[in-house]
Amino acid sequence: MGETGDAIVEAARAQTVALGWDRVRMGAVAAAAGVSRQTVYNEFGTKAGLGEALARHEVDRFVGQVRSALGEHDSDVRAAAYAAIHRTLASAAENPLVRAVLTSTRGGSEELLPYLTTRSELVLAEAAAALLDWTGDRLPDADPAALAFAADSVVRLVVSHIVLPGGPVDETADRLADLAVRLFLMAATAR
């Protein structure tokens, strides 16, 4: 996506935060981005296409944060898991777009939530790949299938706690990090 696409996505993000996804209009997004309505349609095709691009933008940002948190811990799997999970949960709780998306599910006619939760290519696969890359380098003798399952499971649990928080971020991250370590150790001994 080029500068124009980025500007359109940022305008759509701002409007989603302010109004909710169901009230976002392509013409208003175009005006806010300083482009024509036709340009928005040329870039994204439909509102659904714009919704996917908006979700992709947020997912890329979150995956970048996960990779950064993991990278801050060389070989301490527990510390890395905690840092990545905590940063993800805290960022999601503070993210105005995530709040707008979750709030829109309680009354909006069109929902953005499915772009962030049910499209595995957007969330699950990319976040799991980031975790799998990091753990694969630290646990080279682990069973690849078991390690992939562990990474996918951890990501799915984190996403579920974003959508339906179960407690304070610190406590949730601590418990999920413990579980992540167990899953990764099981993968390391599965051969």
Image (cartoon, helix red, strand yellow):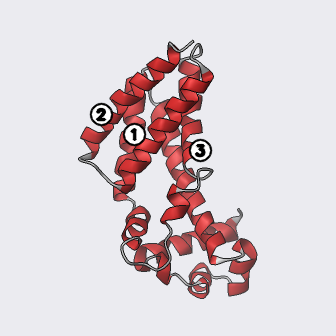
Residue drawn at (28%, 45%) of the image: 169
Cα distance between the residues tagged 3 and 1: 15 Å
- Quadrant location of residue 139? top right
Vertical side of 41 occupied by 143: above or below: above
**Secondary structure under badge 2?**
helix
Of pointers 2 and 1, the one earlier in the residue sequence: 1
Residue 149 pos. (x, y %):
54, 31
The residue where tag 1 is placed is 85
Front residue of 70 and 188 = 188
Residue 43 pos. (x, y %):
73, 73
| Residue count near mark 3 (Cα–Cα under 10 Å), binned few <14, some 14–19, many ≥20 | some
Q: Quadrant of the N terminus?
A: bottom right
Front residue of 89 and 141 = 141
Is 84 left or right of 50, judged from the image as shown? left
Residue 179 pos. (x, y %):
36, 29
The residue where tag 2 is placed is 175
